[in-house]
Image (cartoon, grey):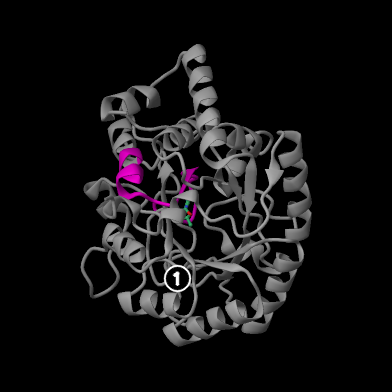
Amino acid sequence: MHHRDILSTLRETSPEALADLWKRADAVRREAVGPDVHLRGLLEISSHCARSCLYCGLRAENKGLTRYRMTREEILACLKEIAGAGYGTVVLQSGEDPALNIDWMAGLIQDIKSSSRLAVTLSLGEQSDAALEAWREAGADRYLLRFETSHAGLYGRIHPPRKGSGASDRLRILRKLMALGYETGSGVMVGIPGQTHEMLAADIALFRDLGLHMVGVGPFIPHPDTPLGGAPASDTADQVPPTDLMVFKAMALTRILCPGTNIPVTTALSTINQEKGRELGLRRGGNVIMPNFTPLKFRASYAIYPEKACIRDSGIESDRKVRELIKRVGRQAGTGRGDAPAMKDGPNRNSNQR
Ligand code: 5AD
């Protein structure tokens, strides 16, 4: 599929053509990754963040947010719940919190790997090569780092560099992750102010070119306590709207271009379409859901964006709802780790082609 076909699909409005797109994405999904919907237990272990990303509620400048950091004991207690619910993966996510230093995280990862069969996915933001190496060494299996947009100008506008350093380079970090043997996930927000259809088409082509194992896309949701909080979508006709329809198009195209990749139905998608987001996401390319097992008392303090879906459901409660949904759409919950099929050929598939 060429750039211009991706682009025209993003601009498609005909109901018949869209129905065809959903059908095609679902057929590719069935063929490439089958009926399993993989469940990942999400733990938001710290809301501290040293960065200033213009869209994110966790940005350091947001003084209105109560910050927390889970203790090791709290984390281990949640892990028991996740493993007990039959999950094969835990996702440890946080802001860029300097207190989660190399040794502390490495120790935690080693503990999890020696006391359970859980695959460990890290989603801890931009980290040094030394940290990524140490955590891989300690047993971490996967890493998630969205590049948010492949357009250098837009990326730079919404990601002020860390104090005292140059512009960040998430693509370099993603290549490093793949070279280290992490199963690597990335993704973008759909509808960032200033994002054009061309940019989003380029993002989707890049998912394929990077050979990612996981691709998460969700709508941009303005957070009132951030610089992009009040931003009316720019008035150019080419602004990508942050709608569920546009997210479904991006998910379906991603499935068609990267057949074997794991595609989660994101919390942000479920937030803007609480009634149907998850179900339609599963029918239009998605094959992963990440129920939130963060203790309820911390939920409000991890407000990346407002009114996050399921903020009131405990891990066990959302697990129950998700399993019901999976049955209702005629699929089955995956058992085991749910590695991306792309991993079976070893990491870094695209650079290893013989
Ligand atoms: N709206 C939607 N998604 C957001 N994220 C951060 N802030 C927002 C927002 N306001 C997403 C980013 C990040 C992921 C953890 O959450 O894509 O990578």
Q: Is residue 71 magenta?
A: no
Q: Residue at x 72, y 47 (%)?
A: 322
The image quarter containing residue 276 is top right
Residue 237 visible in the shown view: no
> Please, is residue 2 above or below residue 229 in the view?
above
Where does residue 217 sit, x and y in percent of width and height?
Answer: 47, 44
As drawn, is 89 to the left or to the right of 296?
A: left
Q: Residue at x 60, y 32 (%)?
A: 283
| Helix, strand or loop status at disc 1 | loop
Where does residue 351 sit, x and y in percent of width and height?
Answer: 27, 54
Q: Which amino acid type corresponds to the residue marked 1 in the rendered image?
A: Cys
The image quarter containing residue 66 is bottom right
Q: Residue furthest front?
A: 354
Q: Is residue 218 magenta?
A: yes
- Foreground of the two, 139 or 230: 139
> Please, is residue 224 above or below residue 202 in the view?
below
Q: Residues within 10 Å of mark 1 (few under 14, many from 20)?
A: many
Task: Please give the range of residues in magenta.
Answer: 204-227
> Please, is residue 21 above or below residue 56 in the view?
above
- Foreground of the two, 180 or 248: 180
Where does residue 170 sit, x and y in percent of width and height?
Answer: 31, 60
Q: Residue at x 67, y 78 (%)?
A: 76
Where does residue 96 sit, x and y in percent of width and height?
Answer: 43, 71
Quarter holding the N terminus?
top left
Q: Which residue is mark 1?
A: 49
As drawn, is 245 to the left or to the right of 351?
A: right
